Image (cartoon, grey):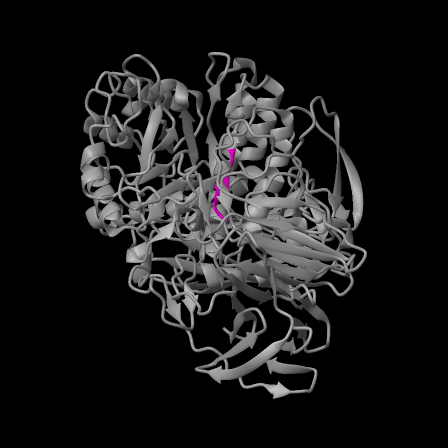
Amino acid sequence: MKISNKIISLKNIDNYLEITTNAAKYRIILLNDNIVRVRCTFDEEFQEEASYALVMTAWKDKMDELLKDERKQVEAISSSYEDLGNYILLTTKSLNINIYKEPFGVEITDKQGNILHSDLKEKSYVKDSLGRIYHYSCMDDEDYFYGFGEKAGYLNKKKRRMRMHNVDTIGYDSEHTDPLYKHIPFYIKFNNKNSIASGIFYNNSYDSTFDMGCERSGYWNKYSYFCADGGELDTFFIYGPKIKDVVRNYTDLTGKTAMSTKYSLGYMGSTMYYTELDKDSDKAILRFLDRCKEEGIPCDGFFMSSGYTTGEDGKRYVFNWNYDRFKNPEDFVSQVKEKGACVAPNIKPGMLISNPLYKEFDEAGAYIKDDEGEKSQTDRYWGGQASFVDFTNPKGRELWKKHLKESLVSLGITSIWNDNNEYEINNTEAICHFEGMKKEISGLRPIMPNLMALMAKETVAEVYQNIRPYIVNRAGFAGIQRYAQTWAGDNNTSWKSLKFNIPVMLGMGLSGVANQGCDIGGFFGPAPEPELFVRWVQNGIFQPRFSIHSCNTDNTVTEPWMYPSYTKYIKEAIKLRYKLVPYLYSLLFEASKEGSPIMRPLIYEFQDDKKLLEESFDFMLGSSILIANVLEKGAKTRKVYLPEGAVWFDWDTKQTYEGGQTIEVEVSLNSIPMFFRSGAIIPIAEGLANIHNDSIETLKLLIEPSEESSFVLYEDDGVTNNYKNGEYLKTLISVKRENSVKIAFEKEGGYDKQPKEINIDLICKDIAPVQVNLRDKKLAMFLDIKEWELSEEGWYFDIEQKTTKIKYKNINENHDLNVNFSVKDLISI
């Protein structure tokens, strides 16, 4: 066993500090004021820099060319240090980095002296006799831990031991199963005592373990640790002080969420059932789209399960079409588009040895090799023995893109569903090309699904240069958000899954993956009972990925109309989803720029409210809407804690509640408890039924003006890359209060297909307006709601909901609206 205990030498080299200890070497790099890299190796020399995960670096890297369109190189802060006797001091504008000489350890504080991170000295960096590497950190009783990617259970992971590994966990228990499909070695630590958040990312893709206080020894201070099966301890400390700052800084490092197509926010139909029919699966899918329209249920796409690839022997062969089920694939894709939908076909990176294309990939050396590096490695897969495409090999990437292009993308398909890509290869010493450097699969397993998604992105771009791809991935590593929307795999059909899938997704959002969801209605198990199905859809409409998908074990198929007497509840919920599309698309834009989650834990928005530290099931949709779904069978009431620091309004009734209290509301089967906060600005589309084909004629804005606030409404064509060339519209909507309420609209960009009418619901909980002016023009006031509805512009006060309804023809330039609340003295008149 090797333990770093004493500094032997140190020197500055090109803006990094190199330290040699008795057991290991270190490089300390101040990447910027908020991110500190501590790189440790127990080998004689550091390995060549070669990261597929990082998009911000301050050094040359083997992957610079491959990631040239994504990677940004910055200049590190000077690593000149001050020797203070027992320790040396490095500084940034935000942080002090104290490096202790003996016993060796790193301590990071803010400028006020708050300890943000402290190595467990005498045991900080360790390599054991089996080659595993450890990083031990001190823990405080007031520490809470969030993130860790896709993990089952409650939001706070304190006192948890979790394994980082990609597994196909069909029918998993969303409270207990570990690991799941994603491998994201990042967490956020929030200290309740000083209310400061920080994060740690381990840039290591070997299987690993986080122990967040399960282990305890009386000879040491309380600690947590990270243990990886190999590689280096490449640790990035990320400062907040807010949780949202940590997420933003982490996604600066590993990438922001891809700006996906707008239609990806629509309802995506799916089921394994249709593509397993003996014949005419194409007709079944087209009929599904027609049925949606007949039922008045909006739908914008269909995830097509792998049954379409089935050969004559019943096995699934990637890039193969079953012509009994799909007589003319190109014509089928065209018909789907005519119906206002996309088709997203399922593809898998494991090629069965009986696949007609197997030999071509094998002879090209495109598979992961055995541990001798000579023959293609085979392993068990769905359908039998298979080899796995090596996406770290240029030959594998190019051959994959060739067949993806020929079999799917050339047919007009620009939506790709990457599935079964966990790379469960049991021979951990199987050899990957690794850009010519050769490395065992145990060190690259979670990288493969990221590169698979990158190849889908590149393939679509090569065939349709100006079309945005829509890519969905099941597995992934840190940075998967740059390429794909994700989902939480093959969940079990149960009330528990409905409930605990929520913190699974919230943890993903805190780990940089803003665009994700889970299978609505449950994937594996018997058909959901009617009440469970309704509640699941009512929750699913708030997930960025909204898809009802199933592989039911009782020969049934989960469809929106499966229980006719309950279909009205399903339809109402999905229509609410479509009303929120302008809000969701603006949140997706925010995620692409800031890294912000779309579904947010309450603690993310209300960090000072200590009652939220353990809240796992209620969440914020963006910054303005609190969602408190009904998650219990037979519920007649729902208790909701409303965070302090805001006033809250019931979505339907506009009833007002002070924050910092728990309320109990009555619920029925059609109830979706929702509350918006003071200062909310929420864009809504009335009547939107199809994102592909419908334009938003009237944009509604729900505005609560008691606090000064702002919101960026983002619009573009939703499909092309024209937004990169200025064809977008960002409207900064801001609310200011003086003697009146001023709502300002500041516009940027060249996208001109704007809604024709603006319709504002302005919450006025204390007093009605006396006058409304648009650009200094007085708008007409109506006493009769019907007259207001027939007018082109003007305003009306709804006294029951205490809401001022304002409408006017949209203005394609900056403008403002002034609402005067002076009391009109009728008596003295």
Q: Residue at x 55, y 47 (%)?
A: 149
In the image, 647 versus 237, the foreground residue is 237
Question: Is 252 within the magenta?
Answer: no
Residue 54 sits in which quadrant?
A: bottom left
Vertical placement of residue 273 versus 677, above or below: above
Count of numbered circles on the image: 0
In the rendering, at what x and y percent does residue 676 appear? Answer: 65, 47
Horizontal arrangement in the rendering, residue 808 relative to residue 315 (left or right): right
Quarter of the image containing the N terminus?
bottom right
Residue beneath the point at 36% across and 43% down: 471
Most common secondary structure along the magenta stretch: loop
From what the image shows, is residue 352 above or below residue 389? above
| For residue 332, side relative to residue 587 (left or right) | left
Residue 678 in percent (x, y) is at 67, 54
Q: Nearer the viewer, residue 462 or 664?
A: 462
Rendered residue at 30%/12% (across/down): 278
Is 405 placed left or right of 539 in the picture?
A: left
Residue in the foreground of this view, choosing between 55 and 38: 38
Residue 785 shows in this picture? yes
Q: Position of residue 811 (x, y in %)?
A: 41, 58
Q: Which residues are magenta?
A: 514-518
